[in-house]
């Protein structure tokens, strides 16, 4: 199996892991929206879409949309931000719309 196909399989499996994240009352979903990783709550909608909780941009910079995140949610997002920053350093194309990183279970 070619390395690129193996990487795609791994990314698909990571995406499945991320779809299972539940933290407090949040049903966490994550996806790349072109300029970083958006973290959202599938239990709530806002403007016809899932409620955004946070966005992780270049270098792991967190922008919060949730005004009062729970401590567990904050730890989860901070962990994802560290992973994003690490992955971006080793692979500049990481997160450019197609890949996901491993999830963290609270």
Image (spheres, rainbow, N blue to C red):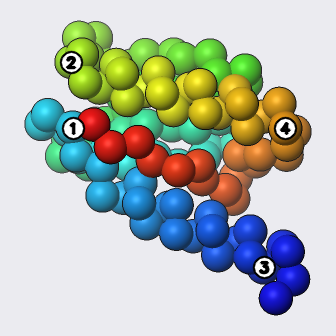
Q: Is residue 87 above or below residue 82?
A: below
Residue 50 at x, y percent in the picture: 32, 44
The residue where tag 4 is placed is 90
Name the residue rendered at 74%, 68% in the picture: 7
Name the residue rendered at 21%, 37% in the picture: 23
The residue where tag 1 is placed is 23
Q: Please state, as top left, top right, bottom left or bottom right, where the N terminus lies in the image.
A: bottom right
Q: Are marks 1 and 2 in contact (CB under 8 Å)?
A: yes
* Mark 3 surroundings within 10 Å by alpha-carbon count, few (fewer than 14), some (14 through 19), many (20 or more): few
Name the residue rendered at 41%, 54% in the picture: 18
The number of numbered badges drawn on the structure is 4
* Mark 2 surroundings within 10 Å by alpha-carbon count, few (fewer than 14), some (14 through 19), many (20 or more): some
N-terminal-most mark, 1 or 3: 3
Report how far apart the C-alphas of labels 1 and 2 lie in the structure: 9 Å
Q: For the residue labelled by badge 3, is the local secondary structure a helix, a strand or a loop?
A: helix
The residue where tag 2 is placed is 70
Label 2 vs label 4, nearer the camera:
4
N-terminal-most mark, 3 or 2: 3
Relative side of 25 to 85, left or right: left
**Looking at the image, which is closer to me, 87 or 62?**
87
Q: Residue lying at the far bottom in this picture: please name it.
A: 1
N-terminal-most mark, 2 or 4: 2
Residue 43 at x, y percent in the picture: 18, 46
């Amino acid at each position: 199996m070619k390395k690129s196909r193996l990487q795609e399989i791994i990314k698909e499996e990571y995406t499945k892991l991320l779809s299972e994240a539940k933290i407090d009352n949040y049903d966490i979903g994550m996806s790349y929206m072109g300029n970083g990783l958006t973290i959202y709550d599938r239990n709530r909608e806002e403007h016809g879409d899932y409620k955004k909780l946070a966005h992780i941009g270049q270098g792991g910079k967190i922008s919060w949309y949730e005004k009062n995140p729970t401590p567990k949610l904050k730890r989860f997002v901070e962990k994802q931000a560290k992973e994003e920053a690490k992955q971006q350093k080793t692979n500049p194309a990481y997160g450019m719309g197609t890949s996901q990183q491993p999830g963290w279970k609270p």
